[in-house]
Image: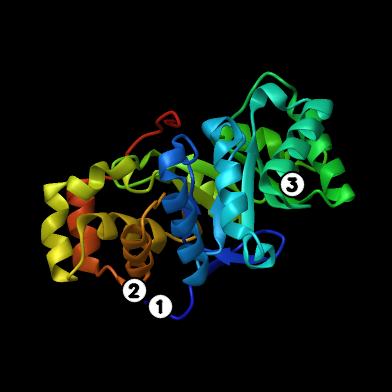
Amino acid sequence: MPSTVRTTTLPSGEAIPVLGQGTWKMGEDARRRADEVDALKLGLDLGVTLIDTAEMYASGGAEEVVAQAIAGRRDEAFLVSKVLPSNASRAGVQRACEDSLKRLRTDRIDLYLLHWPGSVPLTETVAAFEALKKAGKIRHWGVSNFDTDEMEDLVGLPNGGNVQTNQVLYNLSRRGPEFDLAPWSRKRGIPLMAYSPVEQGALAHNARLDAIAARHNATAAQIALAWVMQQDGVIAIPKASSHEHIRQNVAALDIKLTGEDLADLDRMFPPPTRKRGLEMI
């Protein structure tokens, strides 16, 4: 296991881990609650301090799982949560944030994201985020599922340049962001957060990855995850709901893909040659 988790830097200058813990689908089944909480706790023990959740996940249930995991150790965690577009009005963001804070049992969210673009004018949402920052309810804000043109619009708004990240679907089988969104983001120092970095487990069972995995005494899932984390300015947030899974994710930090590995992966999963619309799950 690595002694420290590598970091990347937000536009604010704050360093955050390139490996986080996702919580999508957590909190949906009470019988799995203890295992989910324990997995998140182990992640914290191993230095994976970024935990990503959202008010949408299990209708707040995932945030309650996170609250249990960080109880007594809130200061160790970098909490990310998200507001639904339907709650993205000035008053709606305020209410949604307060509700998330209650479920998370904390007084602040470290990074608060708009879950995807909606019908509320972005100027209103940004103003709401800035008000929450001023009140100390959130420390930073960002977005999720924004394509390049939407990011351009955002940074052109008053205070829109305060955006700290954009969370998008990105993995070996979903390389569309590399065409223009990733270069645009790198140029501006805005990290991408890659959700579903192992394609919800599908890449863990991809036979084409097995040969590369054998070179590193690793699993196919670890190769897929290592590839995401090796991209400049990208943070991976896989979900892990067991001790074994979280340990495997952390061990992927030690994998250094070679030029040969990367060339083989490009042949297996070709990078985009034209603009594609941003994909979502």
**Residue at the spot 50% in from the left edge and 71% down from the top edge:** 45
Q: Secondary structure at mark 3?
A: helix
Question: On the rendered structure, is 7 left or right of 139?
Answer: left
Give residue 161's mark. Answer: 3
In this view, the residue in front, 186 or 99, is 99
Q: Residue at x 79, y 40 (%)?
A: 129
Residue 162 pos. (x, y %) = 75, 49
Dot 2 and dot 3 residues touching (CB under 8 Å): no
Give yes or no for contact between labels 2 and 1 (Cβ–Cβ under 8 Å).
Answer: yes
Q: Of label 2 and label 1, which has the lower sequence position?
A: 1
Q: Distance of mark 2 from mark 1, alpha carbons? A: 7 Å
Horizontal placement of 202 versus 103: left or right?
left
**Residue 254: which disc?**
2
- The Cα–Cα distance between marks 1 and 3, rounded to whole angstroms, is 34 Å
Badge 1 is on which residue?
2
Which residue sits at x=27%, y=68%?
Answer: 257
